[in-house]
Image (spheres, rainbow, N blue to C red):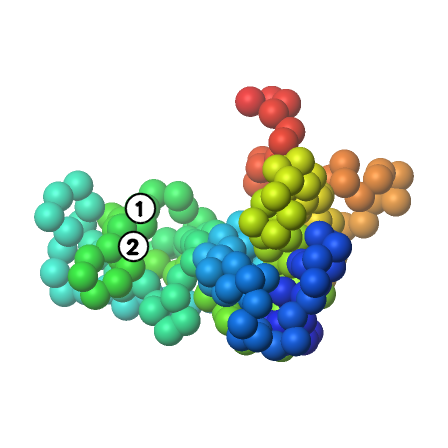
Amino acid sequence: MGSKVDIVNRALTKLNAKRLTSINDGTKNSADANAVYDGILDEVLASFPWNFATRRISLARLVAAPAYKYDFQFRLPSQPKVMHVWEAVSDNQTPTKLYVIEGDDEGGLLLTNFTAIDIKYTARIIDTERFSPWFVESFATRLAAELAYPVTGKRAIAEDQMKQYYFKIQIAGMKEGQQGEDYVADDSKHPLEDDWVGIRHGGTSRIIGDTSGT
């Protein structure tokens, strides 16, 4: 799906700004983009269970128990790093939310009272060739929002790009959710009326900005 410079240039194009000739071409736009690229990548990865970055694993239980409250702790993967845990399945093969994510000097930990745990999570994928089209568009739009003020000096443009980002994330949720057995089409509805997280996971999460039922 293109290179790092392609994604940055996509963001700059949204701002009607000068594009880069290379990711380190010595321009202010290059310096600004490099300063925020990794942080925004992590933010967008963690915001949604992107298909290309989704992994499943049975966690390894550590010998040492947590200091208090929980009976067991499990080491989270570090290569690649876990950006967000979306689902955990307990030792009796049922989904559970009875766990917490913490850490120690060696990395991330999952603490629980179950003796075994499997998780589905978003991994930190940095290879741009593995990004989905919907991720690229969402990521570029979020980058544009971050770069808008330093590049254009106009906060209104930054605010508009953030609104566009929220919209693009919803579209991405719909598109990625259409791949697999969990998707059931409903032609009577506009796609954005769907609860895009709920479609994929059977949950009650709502579209960004929707506060109904809360």
Q: Which residue is drawn at 13% across and 43% down?
A: 68
Residue farthest to the top, as pictured: 213
Amino acid on which the number 1 mark rests in the picture: Val
Q: Residue at x 61, y 37 (%)?
A: 155
Secondary structure beneath dot 1 equals strand
What is the x, y in percent for residue 159?
Answer: 64, 37
Q: Mark 2 points at which residue?
A: 110
Secondary structure beneath dot 2 equals strand
Q: Which residue is drawn at 18% across and 61% down?
A: 105
Res 53 → quadrant: bottom right
Distance in Å between CA atoms under marks 1 and 2 = 6 Å
Q: Which residue is drawn at 39% across and 43% down?
A: 97
Q: Residues within 10 Å of mark 2 (few under 14, many from 20)?
A: many
**Residue 146 appears in the picture as rendered:** no
Amino acid on which the number 2 mark rests in the picture: Leu
The dot on residue 66 is none
Q: Is residue 162 left or right of residue 53?
A: right
Q: Mark 1 points at which residue?
A: 100
